[in-house]
């Protein structure tokens, strides 16, 4: 046999032996890795139909997995791991995975489910020896549900379209945190979300999108569970019925984290567009006499940290109705074409010298007719909750206010309010300032108990007291003082100042 032939035969034999050896080694390692995965899944109380490992492809697949841990239930069609760091695992026992794909997970959590096991003896709660790095996690489809107990309907439901997390890290230290792993959120898409807010209200989102640091919500709704009449049967004291619908909310540079066991939320700009907000209050119910904080205190005392540079609200409409007398329809005020800008909402670094003031500017059409602008400033770090509120209103036909005054004050008014200017300073206990009201041909009719017919005698006396004309050059600023009822809201405080100023102007 020629030398070249011998070399060729020897090479073929060597390749054959190597191929057989690699095949045996591949089968051995695949079996070892498969056994390790099966053991870890079993230790984690996970049942499954099949585990498949392909060493040459550096991939593994778990089919029809089901995990049940006390109050948590997790089902998934398939879990696929790609680009597994085989050598890293064999030499260090640490797990590195290039990509984890999860298809159609169904996650159910029951909050108050009784624990049949001693948590300290739970096999899945032992310390994690390995470090786990998953470079990319992709979830397609699925849902998340949360229940108050075994028999209740879902208090939270989210239908998931897509989720991508990058650089997911898990170790024994991370498992002790509220969020048991580190991650970077790259993409999230939820096509519907429901949350049971309270006995009276529910929250619905039609779509939630997160791309890197930008968040978009479409179809944000806080809906009443009952009609206005039905709502009254669920409350013992005054409590607003409200219906809020927002077309879209977008946040730029949105981020959240945990700081000293407190959640922290930050973003540079929030834009809220297309708002319809209807509020109804039945004043025939007993007063809610609990303390009502001003906005500065409410933000300061939030159970989480917040830092928002600015909020822009555009194309908003607000209607407030108040039933004061049982035999009459509720009084109503409304604000159309409302646009609001808010700067510096934060409860972080309250002790620093350069803590920024919060400023709110707003423009709207009051009662759909009178242009109204407001400039409102307060300091969240100020324990006295000091604020300044100034503004002006243009021409308003007094009759437009009859939607409120007839039902609430038993008054029918006519004439024109030409202009109104106000500037108030206050804090949590009292306020003062000045106000100027210019009006023309102002008349008052006091109504009888039926709310329809005029009480001629009292109306005549009222018009003797009320000056019916105060035009530019004839009216001066009136000094206003008001004591705050701390069981009432900020807006009741503001209305008290306006009302005091109006009485001083008319009489």
Image (cartoon, rainbow, N blue to C red):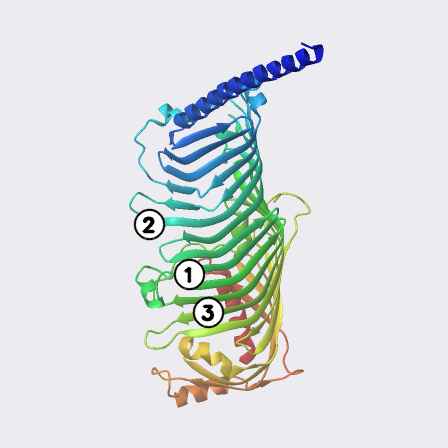
Which sits earlier in the primary sequence, circle 3 or circle 2?
A: 2
Q: The residue tagged with tag 1: helix, strand or loop?
A: strand
Query: Which residue is located at x 52 percent, y 58 percent?
Result: 218
In the image, residue 326 lies at what x, y percent?
Answer: 33, 73
For the residues marked 1 and 2, what is the alpha-carbon distance in whole angstroms?
18 Å
Left or right of residue 383: residue 284: left
The answer to whether residue 435 is visible is no
Q: Residues within 10 Å of mark 3 (few under 14, many from 20)?
A: some
Instruction: State if disc 2 and disc 3 touch (CB < 8 Å).
Output: no
For the residues marked 3 and 1, what is the alpha-carbon distance in whole angstroms?
16 Å
Name the residue at the front extreme.
Answer: 1
In the image, residue 122 lies at what x, y percent?
Answer: 37, 26
Question: Against 169, is 267 above or below?
Answer: below
Q: Mark 2 points at which residue?
A: 153
Is 54 in front, or is 505?
A: 54
Q: Mark 1 points at which residue?
A: 223
Is 19 in front, or is 359?
A: 19
Q: Name the residue under label 3.
A: 320
The image quadrant of residue 237 is bottom left
Nearer the camera: disc 1 or disc 2? 2
Instruction: State if disc 1 and disc 3 touch (CB < 8 Å).
Output: no
In the image, residue 492 lies at what x, y percent?
Answer: 48, 65
Q: The residue tagged with tag 3: helix, strand or loop?
A: strand
Query: Which residue is located at x 49 percent, y 79 percent?
Result: 401
Question: Against 329, is 64 above or below?
Answer: above
In the image, residue 440 lies at what x, y percent?
Answer: 58, 86
């Amino acid at each position: 046999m020629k030398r070249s032939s011998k070399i060729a035969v020897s090479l073929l034999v060597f390749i054959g032996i190597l191929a057989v050896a690699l095949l045996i080694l591949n089968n051995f390692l695949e079996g070892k890795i498969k056994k390790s995965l099966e053991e870890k899944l079993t230790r984690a109380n996970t049942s499954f139909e099949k585990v498949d490992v392909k060493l040459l492809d550096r991939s593994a697949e778990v089919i029809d997995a089901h995990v049940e841990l006390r109050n948590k239930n997790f089902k998934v069609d398939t879990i696929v791991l790609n680009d597994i760091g085989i050598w890293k695992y064999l030499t260090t026992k640490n797990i590195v995975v290039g990509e984890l794909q999860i298809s159609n997970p169904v996650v159910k959590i029951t909050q108050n489910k009784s624990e049949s096991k001693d948590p300290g003896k739970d096999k899945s709660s032992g310390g994690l020896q390995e470090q786990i790095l998953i470079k990319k996690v992709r979830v397609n489809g699925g849902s998340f549900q949360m229940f108050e107990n075994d028999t209740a309907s879902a208090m939270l439901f989210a239908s998931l379209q897509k989720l991508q997390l990058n650089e997911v890290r898990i170790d024994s230290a991370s498992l002790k945190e509220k969020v048991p792993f580190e991650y970077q959120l790259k993409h999230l898409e939820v096509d519907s979300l429901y949350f049971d807010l309270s006995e009276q209200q529910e929250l619905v989102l039609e779509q939630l999108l997160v791309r890197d640091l930008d968040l978009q919500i479409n179809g944000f709704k806080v809906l009443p569970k009952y009609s206005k009449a039905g709502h009254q049967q669920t409350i013992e004291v005054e409590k607003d019925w409200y219906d809020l619908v927002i077309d879209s909310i977008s946040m730029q540079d949105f981020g959240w984290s945990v700081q000293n066991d407190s959640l922290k939320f930050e973003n540079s700009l929030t834009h809220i567009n297309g708002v319809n907000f209807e509020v109804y209050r039945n004043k025939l119910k007993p007063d809610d006499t609990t303390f009502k904080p001003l906005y500065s205190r409410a933000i300061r005392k939030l159970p989480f940290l917040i830092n928002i540079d600015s909020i822009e609200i555009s194309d908003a409409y607000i209607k407030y109705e108040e039933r004061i007398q049982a035999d009459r329809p509720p009084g109503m005020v409304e604000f159309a074409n409302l646009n609001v800008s808010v700067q510096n909402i934060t409860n972080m670094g309250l002790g620093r010298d350069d803590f920024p003031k919060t400023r709110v500017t707003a423009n709207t059409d009051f009662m759909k007719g009178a242009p109204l602008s407001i400039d409102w400033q307060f300091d969240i770090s100020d324990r006295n909750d000091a604020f300044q509120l100034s503004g002006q209103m243009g021409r308003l036909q007094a009759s437009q206010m009859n939607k409120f005054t007839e039902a609430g004050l038993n008054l029918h008014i006519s004439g024109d309010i030409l202009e109104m200017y106000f500037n108030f300073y206050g804090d949590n206990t009292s306020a003062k300032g000045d106000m100027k009201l210019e009006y023309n041909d102002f008349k008052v009719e006091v109504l009888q108990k039926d709310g329809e017919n005029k009480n001629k005698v009292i109306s005549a006396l009222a018009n003797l007291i009320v000056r019916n004309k105060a035009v530019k050059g004839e009216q001066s600023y009136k000094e206003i003082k008001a004591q705050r009822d701390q069981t009432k809201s900020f807006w009741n405080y503001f209305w008290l100042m306006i009302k005091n100023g109006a009485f001083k102007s008319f009489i």
